[in-house]
Image (spheres, rainbow, N blue to C red):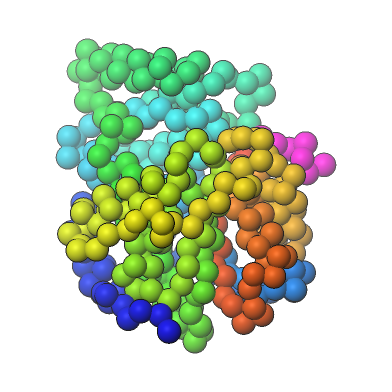
Amino acid sequence: MSEPAIMSHREIRERIATLPRLDIALKNTPLEEARNLSRALGGPRIFFKRDDLTGVALGGNKLRNLEFRLAHAMKDEPDTVIVGLDLQSNSARQTVGACNKLGLKTILVLEGRKPNNVQGNLLVDYLLGAEVHFAADPREQRAMLDGLAEEVRSKGGRPHILNDNPMFDVASAVAYLEVTLEVLEQLAARDLAPDYFYMSSSGKGSAGIMLAQKLIGGFAMHAVCATAEFDLPSRTARIANETIAALGLDIAVTEDEVINTEDFVGKGYGIPSEAGDEAVKLVARTEGIILDPIYTGKAAAGMIAHIREGRFSQDDVLVFVHTGGTPAIFTWNELWL
């Protein structure tokens, strides 16, 4: 028996509604049952939450987060958003698309060197009209962010450095608290309830699902991270508790409650793995759903491995949160030939 819910869906949504927010993403994304994948694995029922279909700039999970991040930014009435991210960042692509909808200029400072063959997310960044700069390392990136902001000011502009936005982490958790409510309601319409959630996360989005677990109960959250850079239990609990404070709740999340595995990172962040590539192909060839080899592929590899280990019964319901990242398949085109 699961613990009784602390709050209703309506009460949770009322708390979320107290935060400043813009309307950017397509929400209530589809929940699609992966019957062929389940049959191929001889495993439980699997549902994909299609957050790769959130609309702007090829979609993805960041658009939901940006509704809160950019709402906070708009308090300063900026005309330019400046953000420092990775060379092939999904977040960069979606930020530029969101800013285009808001009539804002976007300046990207991406860590890495401009490749000879521009592909994937970087290609979309250029298509969307971003001003793109490249930094050799995080220190140079930070200096460039500050320097570009000063340059914008000197020309009479109003810059906002998104990395310094206090909603940067909390926005992700709030967004995926809301996504969990969507999933629960979509499953309830089929007389089902989730037993396990799987998601690629570096501690932000999964913190929101963990928060839903605390408030509503009845399921477990399994985060599969794409990087070993962070102390994920500590980071997830911190972000969950910052979100709890932002929503005015009287609960807490502890590190020992966080289920997060680094077993599928492979050789490192941003590098495809054999297990992740196999998962991308399996999902594509059974369901026609395109994952990416950096984030969702590795998360799916974790879920698939756990199914193959016999961790679940035939009647268990697994929800895989598809956070997007589709342009990466073009960056790593040689993997699919």
- On the rendered image, what quadrant is the C terminus found in? top right
Q: Is residue 156 magenta?
A: no
Q: Is residue 199 above or below residue 152?
A: below
Q: Nearer the viewer, residue 152 or 113?
A: 113
The image shows residue 24 at horizontal and vertical percentages of 35, 51
The image shows residue 288 at horizontal and vertical percentages of 70, 61
Residue drawn at (66%, 40%) of the image: 266
Residue drawn at (45%, 35%) of the image: 92
Q: Nearer the viewer, residue 166 or 309?
A: 309
Number of marks in picture: 0
Q: Nearer the viewer, residue 300 or 106?
A: 300
Range covered by the magenta-colored residues? 330-337
Q: Is residue 264 above or below residue 10?
A: above
Residue drawn at (25%, 26%) of the image: 159
SS assignment for the magenta stretch, majority = helix
Q: Is residue 119 above or below residue 9?
A: above
- On the rendered image, what quadrant is the N terminus found in? bottom left
Q: Is residue 158 above or below residue 102?
A: above
The image shows residue 307 at horizontal and vertical percentages of 68, 66
